[in-house]
Image (spheres, grey):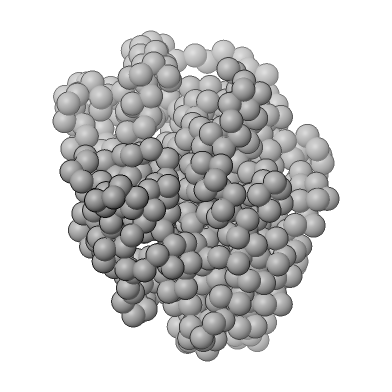
Amino acid sequence: MTTKTKGGEFLIKETNAEEIFIPEQWNEEQLMMKKTCEDFIEQEVSPRLNKIDEQEEGLMVSLLNKAGELGILGISVPENLGGLGFDFVTSMLTTEVIGTGHSVAVALSAHTGIGTLPILYYGNEAQKKKYIPKLASGEWKACYCLTEPASGSDANSGKTNAKLSADGKHYILNGQKMWITNGGFADVFTVFAKIDDDKNLSAFIVEKSFGGITLNPEEHKMGIKGSSTRQVFFNDCKVPVENLLSERENGFKIAVNILNIGRVKLAGAAMGASKHTISIAVKYANERIQFERAISKYGAIRYKLAEQAVRTFATESAIYRASQNIEDAIHALIADGMDEAKAKLKGIEQFAVEAAILKVHGSETLNYVADEGVQIYGGMGYSAEGPMDRVYRDSRINRIFEGTNEINRLLIVDMLLKRAMKGELDLMGPAQKVAAELVGIPEFGETDETLFSYEKKLIMNFKKAVLLTAGGAVQKLVTTLSKEQEVIMNIADMVIETYVAESTLLRVEKLVSMKGEEACKEQLNMMRLYINSACDKIWISGKEALNSFGEGDELRMMLMGLKRFTKQEPFNAKAARQAVAQKLITENKYCF
């Protein structure tokens, strides 16, 4: 089986810009689906945001019903099961648009993602035929019950238990789950529990009608107030044996794989929310007059607007690059004879490193955009009467959802190293070459100067900086590396910046090949701004990591190498930001 790119391979392989998908390539059918989602948000959600936050009785359910009628709940569901059968990349576009819907985005993504996908991907034919059409239409609403009071990040330590009944026809379920999105109105629960004294979780499809299910009142939350979040108790809940999902003890694997999908989707929703927030901020900056001028004319405000746009553009570039990689991997697996549902899981699992990168970067970009959005609004940003109050509060959960950003940073490095140890990814060879390069004489040969040759060299050096730091950490810390969380997170930050910076470069390179340099001036500025900033971040993260485990001459040599790999030419970031900000201000919205 061959695919163009393997997950995590970006660290050791140069990617051709022609291979990646960029958002400027949407076709007519995809844009029609986008418009359907935009109309749904504009007509059904935005006018009711206050009522949604007040959890007006029946409102969220009616909105999900409406989304079901429009086909929005069945975008990723095959047509033979009542869905629209769109591919992964298209599902990411609709996720981006729905991401502007605040609490509705949370309810909808919980239903279509963690609520529906475990059954779609792991269910047998009978289970899929029974549940998926009703979930795709919205007739039944879904939720996902994994977290418990004593098991959050450590999901497999859950205490909820299942025992076979005396007649062998039911599993008797007992336990407590918390933070269950859609818990207040769900008809179908995917519940994770251990059968008897099993080491690993199993998964069950539980209908509310089975009985033995009680709910605590709605949780009072900092943000996403309109989404239903409850504790769910199972008291001798009788689940028919045929409702065991997949095999016994396969629950933890189901949870992990579904979370991989959730991470990519969360990044897409956060990116959509970022774009929307920037548009609101730009409009306000153009309307707000101080000292007889619109505040959009002041450098301090322009800096914020441009920086918001640069980070969002970079996140978007990485999201659609990874989404197409996943889609290509899925098609290659199907072509090799794999079942479609299994191929989707395997394709996404292959890019679990990228999924974790996107989750961290997307959520932290939205956090930055929301925070600076409040600042641009000034006093009105802090008022509950203005739009930034809800944006700010709702954005914060994204760094906790789908595995905290700390857990995801640890996972990025852990997964890369495990793949290297299994021989799936040759990190050691390139890392040894970088180590040899430190003691060699730097090359000063002539190179063909093209529009992107300087940035490509920088990206190549970023990868060397990662390999240098990670290779040094593995060699020096050996068995204790897994306990050195600060070092791992430093390396993860270097990996994240490298992937996003390269994705941004590839997008702009492809865009210039399509439209010409003159038409892409702002995008070129945004790419250079992002890479310039990434370079500084990689230097700081690498230096902190190396200083924490290196010593003596070896440390000095590694720091010199890191300095060489993060060296860049002088760059006028202020002028580039001014140009980006001016385009936003002229268009009066996020326009890239």
The C terminus - image quarter:
bottom right
Q: Where residue 305 appears, x then y in whole percent?
A: 59, 64
Residue placed most toward the observer, 509 or 34: 34
Residue 414 visible somewhere in the drawing: yes
Residue placed most toward the observer, 417 or 92: 92
Identity of the residue furthest to the front in this view: 167
Tell me if 129 is positioned left or right of 423 in this view.
Answer: right
Q: Residue at x 55, y 71 (%)?
A: 104
The N terminus - image quarter:
top right
Residue placed most toward the observer, 541 or 49: 49
Can you tell which quarter of the image residue 95 is in?
bottom right
Tell me if 353 is positioned left or right of 474 in this view.
Answer: right
Q: Residue at x 48, y 86 (%)?
A: 54
Q: Residue at x 19, y 24 (%)?
A: 478
Q: Where residue 372 appears, x then y in whole percent?
A: 49, 68
Q: How many marks?
A: 0
Can you tell which quarter of the image residue 150 is in?
bottom left
Q: Where residue 535 appears, x then y in whole percent?
A: 46, 39
Can you tell which quarter of the image residue 554 is in?
top left
Residue 302 visible somewhere in the drawing: no
Note whether 592 is above or below 221 in the view shown.
above
Q: Which residue is drawn at 51% across and 37% down?
A: 345
Q: Where residue 199 appears, x then y in whole percent?
A: 21, 39
Note whether 88 is above or below 162 in the view shown.
above
